[in-house]
Image: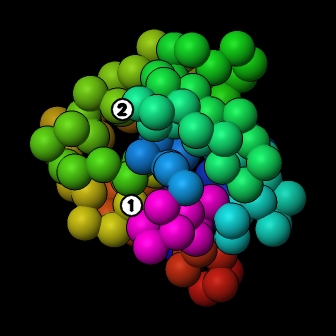
């Protein structure tokens, strides 16, 4: 397992899940539950700011009133770079782009800013592999 993956899974306790809503058919819903079941605090980030899995939602990362360790990104690749930039702006420790979410420029910007970053992977799959 990649060192960045190991570091994020071990050290990040509060996960802002961008794209998380109460749509149970979406991957974000199941992955957030998986993380929660393993003791991680999940924070839904979605324009509708829904409460999901008992956690208060926020419309944007900037609205979250407490520190976030990892920003888990469930949006299309063309939108993901902006989310990564927002993660840098809120001083998150890490950014995780889900399966199929790839933006090499965002990866370079985010890691240059000192954040740990994983791209095109799923924490639930990686957790089981560890």
The answer to whether residue 30 is above or below residue 52 is below
Q: Quadrant of residue 88?
A: top left
Q: Whole-Å distance between the Cαs marked 2 and 1?
A: 12 Å
Toward the viewer: 3 or 38?
38
Q: What element carries label 2?
A: helix
Q: Earlier in the sequence, mark 2 or mark 1?
A: 2
Task: Specify whether 58 is left or right of 35.
Answer: left
Residue 73 x, y percent position in the rendering: 41, 47
Q: Quadrant of residue 99?
A: bottom left
Q: Which residue position is annotated with label 2? A: 84
Toward the viewer: 127 or 24?
24
The answer to whether residue 51 is above or below residue 21 is above
Confirm whether the magenta stretch covers residue 55. no
Identity of the residue furthest to the bottom in this view: 129
Rendering colour mode? rainbow
Q: Which residue position is annotated with label 1? A: 98
Residue 58 x, y percent position in the rendering: 57, 27
Q: What element carries label 1?
A: loop
Task: Specify whether 37 is left or right of 58.
Answer: right
Circle 2 crowding by C-alpha within 10 Å: few under 14, some 14–19, many from 20:
many
- Disc 2 and disc 1 in contact, CB within 8 angstroms: no
Bounds of the magenta segment: 23-32
> Residue 110, can we see it?
no
> Residue 44, can we see it?
yes
Does the magenta stretch mainly form a helix, a strand or a loop?
helix
Q: In which quarter of the image is residue 22?
A: bottom right
Residue lying at 45% horizontally and 13% vertically, measured from the top left = 89
Residue lying at 66% horizontally and 29% vertically, measured from the top left = 68
Task: Specify whether 66 is left or right of 30.
Answer: right
Residue lying at 44% horizontally and 73% vertically, measured from the top left = 25
Residue 46 x, y percent position in the rendering: 45, 36
């Amino acid at each position: 397992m990649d060192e960045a993956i190991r570091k994020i899974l071990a050290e990040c306790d509060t996960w802002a899940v961008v794209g998380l809503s109460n749509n149970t058919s979406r991957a974000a819903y199941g992955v957030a539950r998986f993380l929660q079941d393993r003791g991680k605090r999940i924070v839904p980030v979605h324009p509708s700011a829904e409460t999901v899995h008992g956690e208060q939602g926020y419309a944007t990362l900037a609205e979250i009133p407490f520190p976030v360790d990892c920003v888990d990104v469930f949006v299309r690749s063309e939108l993901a770079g902006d989310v990564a930039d927002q993660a840098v702006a809120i001083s998150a420790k890490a950014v995780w782009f889900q399966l199929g979410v790839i933006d090499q420029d965002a990866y370079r910007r985010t890691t240059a800013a000192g954040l740990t970053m994983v791209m095109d992977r799923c924490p639930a799959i990686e957790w089981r592999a560890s």
